[in-house]
Image (cartoon, grey):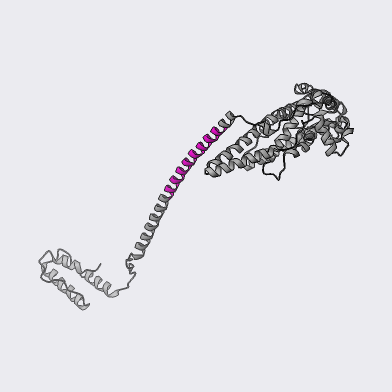
Amino acid sequence: MYYLEVIDFLEKDQHFREKLHNTDMEDIKQGKLAKELDFVSHHVRTKLDELKRQEVNRLRTLIKAKQDLEGGNDIAVDHQALLKQFEYLNHMNPHTFEVDDLDRLIKSATNDLENYDKERHDEFKKYEMMKEHDRREHLKTLDEDERKKEEEHYEEMRKKHADHPKVNHPGSHNQLKEVWEEADGLDPEDFDPKTFFNLHDTNGDGFFDEQELEALFTKELEKMYDPTNEEDDMVEMEEERLRMREHVMNEVDSNKDRLVSLDEFLVATKKKEFLEPDSWETLEQNQAYTDEEMREFEEHLAQQEQDLNLKAVDLQKQRDELERQQEQLNAQKVELQQAVEHMERLKSQKVEPPPEVHVEGNAFPEIHAVENQLHLEQPAPEAPQDTLQEHHEQQNEVLAQHGLPQTHQDLPPGHQEAAQGQHNLP
């Protein structure tokens, strides 16, 4: 889109448009056309500057969006470094469109165009081989009778598709004259190449571009393909259209700029090949792949399937291991829960000791009175035996008065003090 916008504005400049139309593809590839940028009008240069700034901003937005999708919201984005991947743009100068920008853009575009048809051929070849591979694999699933019927049906559809009116050589007098008559509704006897060109140069730029050329082949394609028919493949129809366009470009586009000018078209209509062309070989007459390519393709598919199976086995082992580890974790969780429940039961069954009684002050005055009386009347240890005996008797009297047990009177000397001490309250 950016390339088309740039070329569109450059063609608004008369000087550049003339240079573009008179420069062959080889000179364009070598950068000679890019140098003509210095001679375009100020208005066009200003618009090109604006287009470049818009493109730089678009690329930066895409880079940021990609970064966000990949989860890098917190990572600083180096836009200048990332812009390097877009080779068609001079990212060091994001503000003005210079000769280097046009040179880069032309080289990038021509390289893409040159690779387009090759890549298209490869993709279509893969499509056709996969189509045949799937058919063969389907046959393997059938028994002998079913396989025979399927093969007969396949041959019937193939022959039915090949049974169509003659296809004119693309770009030949007969092919264009048929368009003139059936699509344009004009008398075939009045066919005029210049008038035909002007009728089908739909954008009026003086060239047939690829899309305008491809539109010329619709009548030929309708002879071979009908979307309602089982035997007709619409993917093959589009490939046939692109083959026709590619063929005409190779025959008519003399300066290889992928455009057919009026002059190139008129020159081609004077060639013998235009009036007496060879017959056109359609896709069914030109198999897209060789037997060797098909063999290599199926070997590659078989290897891919084997690799996928090995990965599937490995993934299953990993899954089984994860399930085993999960089972272990679940078992540990159950054991832990049981241990917690057991401890809770033990805690609920445990008997708490009675609360400790603290006696403060003179809560039992009688005991304190006896204790004081006994201690006050306590004789000295060196008192005579008679005195000690008398004191012992007095203690018993005191204890008897208060209903307390008396000390033993028959304790031998030396043990009486110990007996007395046992009845002394703390």
Q: Quadrant of residue 245?
A: top right
**Observer able to see residue 48:** no
Q: Residue at x 69, y 44 (%)?
A: 229
Q: Where is residue 46 in the image (x, y as percent from the top left)?
A: 83, 32
Which quarter of the figure is the C terminus placed in?
A: bottom left
Left or right for 314, reference 354: right
Q: In this view, does 397 lie to the left or right of 331?
A: left
Where is residue 172? Give x, y as percent.
80, 29
Measured as percent of width and height from the top left, residue 142 is found at 53, 44
Residue drawn at (55%, 40%) of the image: 137
The answer to whether one can see residue 291 in this image is yes
Query: In the image, is residue 389 above or below residue 317?
Result: below
* Residue 389 or residue 10, whichever sits in front: 10
* Count of numbered circles in the view: 0
Q: Which of 261 and 205 is in front in this view?
A: 261
Question: In which quadrant is the N terminus drawn?
Answer: top right
Start-end of magenta stretch:
297-326
Check if residue 413 falls in the magenta segment: no
Q: In the depicted view, which residue is nearer to us: 247 or 10?
A: 247
Compared to 208, does 316 lie above or below? below
Q: Residue at x 36, y 63 (%)?
A: 345
The image quarter in which residue 157 lies? top right
Q: Is residue 299 magenta?
A: yes
**Is most of the magenta stretch helix, strand or loop?**
helix
Using residue 174 as the reference point, say whether residue 157 is left or right of it.
left
Q: Where is residue 270 in the image (x, y as percent from the top left)?
A: 84, 24
